[in-house]
Amino acid sequence: MEVINISKISDLTFHNASHYITQKFSKKHDGVDYGTNLKKIPIYPIEDGIVTKVFKDSYGAKIVKVYYPRIDMTFTYGHLDKIYVKKDEKVNNNTKLGLTGKTGLATGIHLHLSIYDNKLKKYIDPEEYSLIYNKEPIIYIVKKGDNLTKIAKKYNTTWQNIYNKNKDIIGPNPNLIYPGQKLYI
Ligand SMILES: [Zn+2]
């Protein structure tokens, strides 16, 4: 079995920009709060998804919800300063969803991230889910005009990583991939 690169949910969300936990997941807190060094920084979807809701709660917190079909989970991103997406918009790991902020009931600039598992019908701990997230392989179907570098960028990995996992499928030349080929990310 090949070793799959671990990318934490929060690293994918912040594109590796520095962040730290300010409040953990608990019975009273359905997600994790991540401080972003007092700065308003962009947040990104973890993978291909669709915006299901953009709204303000009763305290004025700006919130975006994104549904990820592959994993059948809905992520809530809260206390944003700005939101750049609209309901029903298709998003991927390169789409800026918004900026971290302190709208609503918040004492400092942070992201409240919660994950609702639609299969289990409950909120799960984003930090715990990070550990298993990448073990579920992503299968990507090559489109016209794709190359490994382009695909790698989309999934926050390197072309070498993708090539190593798919040598049997791609063959000796990493520059030759064809529409319709199925690759493990
Ligand atoms: Zn929170």
Image (cartoon, grey):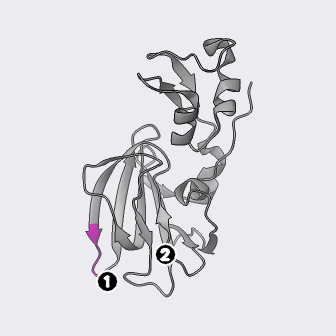
Q: What element carries label 1?
A: loop
Above or below residue 18? Residue 74 is above
Residue 1's spot in the image, x, y percent? 74, 24
Q: Is residue 27 left or right of residue 145?
A: right
Residue 43's spot in the image, x, y percent? 47, 62
Which residue is pictured at 33% across the width and 62% down the height?
84
Decide if residue 148 is in sight here: yes
Residue behind mark 2: 40
The type of residue carrying mark 2 is Lys
The type of residue carrying mark 1 is Tyr
Residue span colored magenta: 55-59
Which label was assigned to residue 115? none
Considering depth in this image, is 49 or 26 the residue closer to the camera? 49
Decide if residue 29 is in sight here: no
Q: Which secondary structure dominates the residues rendered in magenta?
A: loop
Q: In this view, does 178 lie to the left or right of 81?
A: right
Above or below residue 24? Residue 15 is above
Residue behind mark 1: 59
Q: How crowded is mark 1: few (under 14 residues within 10 Å), some or many (20 or more)?
A: few
C-alpha distance separating marks 1 and 2: 19 Å
Which residue is pictured at 44% across the width and 77% down the height?
101
Q: Pointers 1 and 2 in contact (CB under 8 A)?
A: no
